[in-house]
Amino acid sequence: MIDTLEKTNVFTKSIEEASYELWDKFEKLRAPFLELLNKTSFPTTRDEYWKYTRTTKISKSSFNFPKKGNSIDVEIPVNAYVIYLNNGLLDEFSVIESELLSIKSFETITPDQIAKYFGHEQDNERNIFNLLNSAYFSSGLFIEVKKELDKPVYIVNQLNGENIFAQPRKIIVGNKFSKATIIEHTVSNNCNNVLSNNVTEVFVGENSNINYTSIQNEGSGVFHLDNIQAHQDKDSIFTNHTYSFQGDWIRNNINTWVNGENCETNMFGAYNAKNKQLIDNHTTLDHRVANCLSNELYKGTASDKATVTFNGKVFVRKDAQKINAFQSNNNILLSDDATINSKPELEIYADDVKCSHGSTTGQLDEEALFYLRSRGLSEASANNMLVGAFVGEVIEHVEIPELRDYIKSLYGLE
Amino acid sequence: MLSIKNLHASIEDKEIIKGLNLEVKAGEVHAIMGPNGAGKSTLSSILAGNEDYEVTKGEMLFDGKDLSELGTEERAAEGLFLAFQYPVEIPGVSNMNFLKTAINEIRSYRGEAPIAAKEFLKMVKEKSKLVELNPDLLKRYVNEGFSGGEKKRNEIFQMAMLEPKLAILDETDSGLDIDALRVVSNGVNALKSPSNATVVITHYQRLLDYIIPDFVHVLYDGRIVKSGTKELALELEEKGYDWIKEELATA
Ligand SMILES: Nc1ncnc2c1ncn2[C@@H]1O[C@H](COP(=O)(O)OP(=O)(O)O)[C@@H](O)[C@H]1O
């Protein structure tokens, strides 16, 4: 058992006792992040970026280096290249290498191959969880999309056990004119104090189109963080979908840097937070150059004693003219004891731009509820139907029909 | 089937229904007419269980059951149906899914098994034909982007699907052209049987040329002040409501 994360030095020492072969192999890449980690402390709610989400429960916990647990049955709704992660470790993995796609584990590559990608540009100063992963990743996948894929890549992220520290690292590179959808589907079983700290770095090359969809369908007992860093070259499209279900602590940090002109960026997310769930989505989009489009839509509900946070930051830099940036976050508050914090932020330094942002928090439409009930629907199912319709607007943007239907079914939609 | 005795109801402490009596038996068609603001829509909302209104006095029995003890959905399951004057649009909820859920929840209330998919589709086909409702509309979201006439047809279509014992049609004729009026009325007439009943709320006689009432009631200032047969409707059409007000004043 390693000591609490909070005491980073102790943590470092004891985790090194685990002497994980990958860490030795990638020592040079890890070193600068390890050094930074040792100088960084966990955030408090006084830090703007963590204002509504405490990390104390994580920083005061102790975790073990992961071992694989039992595998969990997961329905995979699409024909796909399937990869299994179990407690942050690759499970029965074999290299995929074709003219369309290459997927390799960190065991099967040299550090040189990923040197220019690993930790390329991250918001490490405000997000210690990137550093934790860079210093102590538990597995690594290097995915190179060479052309337009014939089917999506489906990563099943299984969590299972107690006091586990699961930190998968993914590097996704979209070559020129390539196209792919990469789905990550998290599930859990009997978890207690499991930290699932994912870092995914996406390099969206010229004229490529990469879609990264995260289905967060774990149960309780998991601290789930998706830290996504996307870097777009000119003429590319990056789309991110994040669907959160019943996990009791979910924090998503999604950053996109648009470095080339004529890019399109889409960010979609939906959540129905219940009980004492905490679901926090922080997105940052940086328009650094001109002639780009971005579109962001996050919708969801909070009931019982749940807490939902949305913070969407959009920068339009000084020379980034002719940017169209749309952002919207709509919430429905279903109980007086639930909390919704919604903060869209636009920072615009260019003058010829079209930007809009909006945030709404409302109630269910009483008139619609009455109408449904007058036809025989119970209050609960009328509620569900309206909530489903509300988040359904986001899910409509999922392009693959089978995946769209599957995500709808997870929300109890038809 | 429906027995309303000395009903008083108010909204925000303003009394709107002021001692209303009405008896509806199986097989009957009743028309309730009256000037604007008389309380016609309020009455239908109260019957359907709209909680914005507070029943302060009197009783409403439906097949012997006290309606005020039943929630809106329980009233529907017991066989009460309200065709709304202004059907609400519900984006994101598909007509078909909504209807199927409604039917199954009503069935479950009655201790019946869910409807088979095939049977449901057959019924949809049959009943949409009855009200000449374009089946493509059913693939859309509930009432979203429907014209006024389509919304009213959809109400009668839902009524046909749910097969209620008592249907209350609230100003179903408003906003309908003559063709739509005919179609909607044909639908209502086709659904008539000795075991169910219809209450038609309207302030024009026009609809009653198509749906022939057994009884006509005048609702004025929260009460039924006059009842008669279909001739009363013609008289109202001809003379307006002032003579009734005068009759009341002199009484
Ligand atoms: N929500 C409300 N708040 C206050 N007064 C209302 C409300 N709804 C109806 N009323 C009043 O109740 C009376 C009856 O209205 P309504 O039932 O719509 O009449 P009708 O359908 O016969 O035209 C009117 O005086 C109207 O102003």
Image: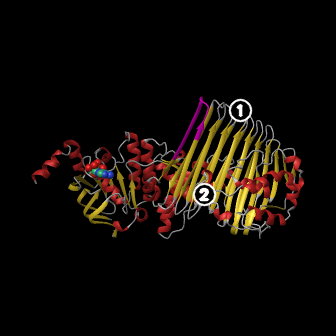
- Is B241 placed above or below A25 here? above
Q: Residues within 10 Å of mark 1 (few under 14, many from 20)?
A: many
- Is B84 placed above or below A232 here? below
Position of the C terminus of chain B, as image quadrant, is bottom left
| Residue at the spot 36% in from the left edge and 52% down from the top edge | B169
Camera sees residue A398 = yes
| Residue A340 percent location from the top left of the image | 53, 55
Q: How many marks?
A: 2
Q: Is residue A358 magenta?
A: yes
Kind of residue sitting beneath label 2? Thr
Examine the residues drawn in magenta and state their main secondary structure: strand
| Residue A118 percent location from the top left of the image | 80, 48
Q: Is residue A136 magenta?
A: no
Residue picked out by circle 2:
A53
Asked whether the residues under marks 1 and 2 belong to the same chain, the reply is yes
Left or right, B154 with reference to A312: left
Chain label for disc 1: A
Residue picked out by circle 1:
A261
Sequence-wise first label, 1 or 2 = 2
User: Magenta residues, as a range?
Assistant: A346-359
- Please give the label number shown on residue A316: none
| Residue at the spot 56% in from the left edge and 59% down from the top edge | A307
| Residue B191 percent location from the top left of the image | 41, 55
Nearer to the camera, B112 or A87: A87
Kind of residue sitting beneath label 1? Glu
